[in-house]
Amino acid sequence: KSSIAMILSQLIGSMSRVNLLRLKKDFGKQAFINKKMVLFDEVDAKRLDSEVEAEFKALVSGDPITIDRKYEDPIDIRLNQAYVITSNQIPLISDVSDGFFRRIIFLVFRKKIAKRDSSFFQKQVERELAGILNWALEGLIEFNQEQCLLEPECSRKIKKNLTEASNNLHLFMDHHFTDSFGNVYQYKLTDQQSWTCFDDFYKDYERYVTEVDKGVQLSSKMFSIRFKDNFLNYPIESI
């Protein structure tokens, strides 16, 4: 991921390299003006801050946004730029809707370049940058012809797994819990008496996915996050 980030920075030139948390800071997006690409480098795999996620979704939507500028009046602008996030793991995103995911392509890099080879790699890239540019221009021609980016299989698989895992949590709740009117009741994560503890509840979910859903299972961490977003602080009645 650091290698592709270095290549992109040399190819594009006009880019901003920032921390993703900058999105929620005052004047955080001012550096994006007149840039062709914004690189959010080394993003933590933990759950994205809700405010940061909302700001990022506004950026990738392509709609005009308001940017506050230091010592200047705010401006409304449509940013025509690419956004790249690098991370060792996929950040936990609460929104797995098609409207959000269709604007994202996941690239998985399985080959790790040893640190001792990094300087050699950088020199190699500099020597071959013209050839890499020609390769990128071929991709641009193909993009103009197809009017879309060709998404690799690894990206489609990641989206499918994230969407299925999110959906089967809702199916699990619908399958196991209801109220007297047939509505899905939500759940409270606590070990207090009269409430089911989280570990037992997650085991119920694991059994449901294995025996009924046959789909992709959320990790316990992701399960907890998705659950708190959708089914927290309501009593339940088990069927």
Image (cartoon, rainbow, N blue to C red):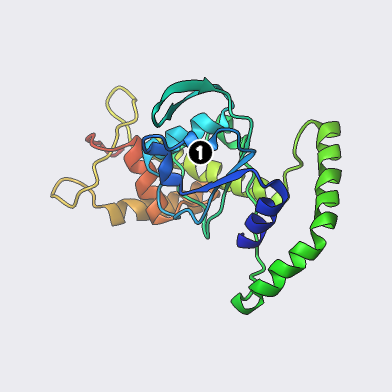
Element under disc 1: helix
**Quadrant including the N terminus:** bottom right
Across and down, in percent, residue 5 comes to 63, 55
Q: Is residue 170 visible?
A: no
Q: Amino acid at mark 1?
A: Ala
Q: Alpha-carbon neighbours of circle 1 within 10 Å: few (<14), some, or many (≥20)?
A: some
Residue plotted at (62% across, 41% down): 37
The number of callouts visible is 1
Q: Would you place residue 119 above or below residue 34 in this image? A: below
Residue plotted at (32% across, 36% down): 231
**Quadrant including the C terminus:** top left
Q: Viewer-proximal residue, 56 or 11?
A: 11
Going by the image, does 231 lie left or right of 56? left
- Residue under pointer 1: 31
Q: Is residue 235 visible?
A: yes
Hey, which residue is sitting farthest bottom in the picture? Answer: 116
Q: Would you place residue 59 above or below residue 129 in this image? A: above
Residue plotted at (40% across, 32% down): 70
Q: Would you place residue 65 above or below residue 8 in this image? A: above
Across and down, in percent, residue 224 comes to 35, 49
Instruction: Choose top left, top right, bottom left or bottom right for residue 146.
Output: top right
Q: Viewer-proximal residue, 10 or 217?
A: 10
Going by the image, does 122 lie left or right of 175? right
Across and down, in percent, residue 147 comes to 79, 30
Hey, which residue is sitting farthest front in the picture? Answer: 71
Across and down, in percent, residue 126 comes to 75, 63
